[in-house]
């Protein structure tokens, strides 16, 4: 919220992003033209078709539709390619138009000396903005000390800096006393478990209590009342989550989002005010379209079926999936309910709307299609309610699980292992494995760099590969989400035999802030290593551990031996990339083939009996 | 060379001035911190040069502190992100380095600036 104070966002701050979008739009238009030319060449041999093609390209209305139906009759693949290019160009064009409108609105509002839209945010975020100002001042103080003996530092107006700090501190104290009301946290599935609760929540969100009553009445006419209640609950959660979701098609991937899941749940997940400012138009559209969709449920002959169909189309739109793209998908109502119960709207929107940022000229060039396929596969399997199965049976995962026999495979994919340990902060730590849709949130623990909106490309390998088990550590003192996580990977030695490889522990940032006991990390690591060792015993395979955790293995009385210069085989990733700070020095890299990895830090191995 | 000739003698007048007119827009949220402090562009440039000098001298953490100070004041230049990337890399923080590098690259690209290939390669090698 740097120095904006919640009031003066200027169009100049947004224009650099507009330039980038304009370039993308031009590139997309050029690409469309190329594909059109290619498609045009297909019909040139047939005079009648060529004539129709010419008139289609010059048509004033339904030009794209006319071109598509013509090419579809000749070559379906080219038609699909052409359609994709049209959709992308249209998407970018609408984003650019919205951006321009917003820039104009900002200029006009700033000229008037007021900004009604941002004013609303300023009310809610006034405290945050003042605290940010104080942080900025402290950062500058530290900078001047660090600069040392130089002209700028010796001439710096330190008295003015101190005076600003004093004034803002007193404003913060006043706001503190004013008891600024925090926004309500995200709805839980249990809060909208009945038709009445869901309908009332929707009525509150849309400010239409009469709509709530009508929805309850419509529910009484539904054939399957239980399904109606579930879908209405899904609708309520969708509206609620969309109500504070960034518009990633505008604000893209970056550092301007939250660091932890708690931030998102408390709707305090944007670091910069422009994020929610730019989401304002979409939010208005969401509410308008949702109202329309729900009114059609009230008027429908079969309210249950209409609700389910409208929920599907609204959910697809909210997560940024074009209906054409999803025309062959079979979204399930249970799948959507599970996703929304796990607050998955925001991560899915982020993945689908920032997929084009995953491959750029400098970052993983030439992988756009592969990323698009990976995101599509993940999204589709989640919506169809078969994600857990897809994750273990897709082509890459099948290859990754090859070295395991039946019993080992069952032990690897089973989530029965759990270890507990009492920690010095008074809580009990308990491990478990996460392997379903909640994986979307996993990298927000100890983030931010692999989080879905900081770097969704780094999350894809976790979402797509059965070789990675996510071990989370719950803390009884930290009830809302796991306090730490780590990856346990299935690799192979050079003879093709399975080896388990334990990655470093990541602790939730707010948990680290809340519990500052210096040795707490060691207890988390002990629970984690104990869990991994148990898994290794069940599978009868060796476990590779960071040698710096040798004292923990001693504490757990696990016999280990050093493994100098270990080499292991990492099977190809199903998520385009793999991401790890210990297996290579690359952090994240395109990993479409099996490769040998040589960890750069010393490792030790625990070899269970019989392995 | 004397300390005066090197412009390193502190200016008490500069350090102790309090300009209420400059502060007000910042407190109202209408100006950034550099304007609120009444800083001129030359002083900001000097600080950026100092951040670069600190980085070249191997004082990576100090260089980071100065650069973050510049950002907090509302002055952002693509070079800041690239300097931060280099410092984080030198301090063994590859994740932070990678993110800063991406930021710098995106800013350069948004501003239509291309680094000479040799310079770009040199950055990557480091």
Image: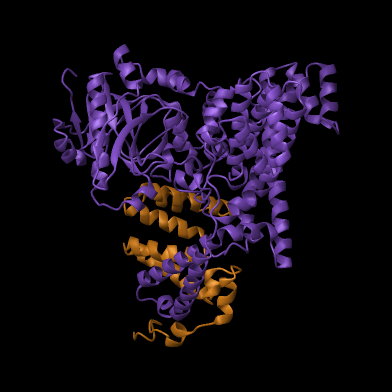
User: Which residue sits at x=51%, y=69%?
Assistant: A174
Residue extending farthest top:
A406
Image position of A415 (left or right of A203): left
Residue depicted at x 17% and y 38%: A550
- Please provide percent x and percent y for residue A304: 68, 23
Q: Chain A is drawn in which colour?
A: purple
Location of residue A146 in the rendering, given as x and y in whole percent from the top left corner: 36, 69
Task: Give the x, y percent position of residue A88.
Answer: 66, 35
Quarter holding the C terminus of chain A is top left
Locate residue A216: give its quadrant: top right
Residue A514 image position (x, y, % from top left): 35, 52
- Image point 48% across, 42% down: which residue? A455
Q: The chain coloured orange carries which letter?
A: B
- Depth check, front residue: A54 or B89: B89
Q: How is the image coloured?
A: by chain
Whether residue A379 is visible, yes or no, is no
Choose top left, top right, bottom left or bottom right for residue A324. Answer: top right
Q: Is residue A386 visible?
A: yes
**A215 relative position to A361: left or right:** right
Q: Is residue A386 above or below residue B1?
A: above
> Is the residue A406 above or below the residue A585 in the image?
above
In this rendering, the count of numbered labels is 0
Measuring 72% from the left and 57% from the top, which residue is drawn there?
A105
Quarter where residue A298 is shown: top right
Pick the residue in front: A34 or A591: A591
Question: Viewed as shown, does residue A364 lie left or right of A494?
Answer: right
């Amino acid at each position: 919220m740097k120095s904006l104070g919640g009031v003066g966002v200027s169009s100049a701050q947004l224009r650099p992003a507009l330039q980038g979008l304009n370039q993308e739009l031009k590139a997309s238009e050029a690409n469309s033209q190329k594909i059109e030319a290619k498609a045009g060449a297909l019909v040139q041999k047939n005079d009648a078709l060529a004539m129709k093609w010419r008139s289609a390209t010059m048509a004033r209305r339904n030009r794209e539709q006319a071109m598509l139906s013509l090419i579809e009759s000749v070559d379906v693949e080219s038609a699909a390619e052409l359609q994709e290019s049209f959709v992308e160009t249209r998407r970018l064009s609408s984003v650019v138009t919205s951006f321009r409108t917003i820039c104009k609105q900002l200029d006009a509002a700033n000229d008037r000396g007021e900004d009604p839209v941002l004013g609303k945010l300023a009310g809610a975020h006034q405290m945050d903005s003042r605290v940010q100002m104080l942080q900025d001042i402290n950062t500058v103080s530290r900078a001047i000390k660090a600069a040392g003996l130089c002209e700028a530092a010796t001439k710096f107006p330190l008295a003015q800096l101190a005076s600003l700090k004093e004034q803002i501190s007193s404003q913060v104290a006043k706001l503190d006393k004013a008891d600024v009301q925090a926004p309500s946290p995200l709805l839980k599935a249990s809060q909208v478990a009945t038709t009445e609760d869901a309908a009332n929540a929707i009525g509150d969100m849309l400010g239409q209590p009469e709509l709530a009553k009508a929805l309850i009445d419509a529910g009484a006419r539904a054939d399957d009342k239980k399904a109606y209640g579930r879908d209405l609950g899904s609708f309520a959660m969708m509206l609620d989550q969309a109500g504070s979701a960034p518009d990633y098609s505008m604000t893209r991937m970056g550092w301007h989002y939250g660091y932890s899941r708690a931030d998102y749940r408390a709707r305090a997940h944007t670091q910069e005010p422009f994020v929610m400012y730019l989401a304002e138009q979409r939010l208005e559209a969401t509410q308008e379209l949702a109202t329309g969709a729900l009114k059609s449920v009230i008027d429908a002959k079969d309210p249950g079926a209409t609700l389910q169909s409208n929920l599907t189309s609204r959910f697809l739109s909210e997560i940024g999936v074009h209906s054409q793209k999803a025309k062959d998908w079979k979204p399930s109502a249970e799948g959507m309910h599970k996703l929304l119960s796990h607050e998955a709207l925001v991560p899915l929107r982020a993945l689908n709307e920032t997929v084009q940022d995953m491959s750029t000229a400098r970052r993983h060039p030439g992988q756009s299609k592969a990323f698009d396929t990976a995101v599509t596969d993940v999204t589709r399997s989640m919506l169809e309610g078969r994600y857990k199965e897809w994750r273990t049976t897709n082509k890459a995962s099948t290859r990754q699980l090859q070295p395991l026999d039946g019993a080992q495979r069952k032990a690897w994919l089973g989530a029965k292992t759990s270890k507990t340990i009492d920690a010095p902060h008074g809580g009990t730590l308990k491990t478990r494995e996460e392997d379903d849709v909640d994986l979307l949130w996993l990298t927000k623990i100890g983030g931010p760099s692999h989080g879905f909106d900081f770097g969704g490309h780094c999350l894809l390998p976790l979402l797509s590969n059965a070789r990675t088990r996510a071990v989370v550590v719950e803390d009884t003192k930290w009830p809302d989400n796991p306090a730490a996580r780590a990856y346990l990977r299935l690799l192979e030695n050079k003879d093709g035999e399975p080896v388990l490889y334990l990655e470093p522990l990541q602790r939730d940032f707010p948990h680290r802030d809340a519990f500052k006991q210096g040795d707490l990390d060691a207890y988390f690591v002990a629970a984690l290593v104990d869990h991994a060792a148990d898994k290794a015993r069940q599978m009868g395979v060796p476990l590779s551990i960071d040698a710096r955790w040798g004292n923990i293995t001693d504490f757990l009385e696990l016999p280990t031996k050093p493994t100098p210069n270990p080499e292991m085989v990492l099977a190809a990733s199903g998520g385009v990339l793999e991401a790890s700070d210990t297996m290579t020095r690359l952090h994240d890299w395109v990993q479409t083939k099996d490769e040998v990895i040589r960890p750069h830090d010393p490792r030790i191995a625990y070899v269970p009996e019989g392995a | 060379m004397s300390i005066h000739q090197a412009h390193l003698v502190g200016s008490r007048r500069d350090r102790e001035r309090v300009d209420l007119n400059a502060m007000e827009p910042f407190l109202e949220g209408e100006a950034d911190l550099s304007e609120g402090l009444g800083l001129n562009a030359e002083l900001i440039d000097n600080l950026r040069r100092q951040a670069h000098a600190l980085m070249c001298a191997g004082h990576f953490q100090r260089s980071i502190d100065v650069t973050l100070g510049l950002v907090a004041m509302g002055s952002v230049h693509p070079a800041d992100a690239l300097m931060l990337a280099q410092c984080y890399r030198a301090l063994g923080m590859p994740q932070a380095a990678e993110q800063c590098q991406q930021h710098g690259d995106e800013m350069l690209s948004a501003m239509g600036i291309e680094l000479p290939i040799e310079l770009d390669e040199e950055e990557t090698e480091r």
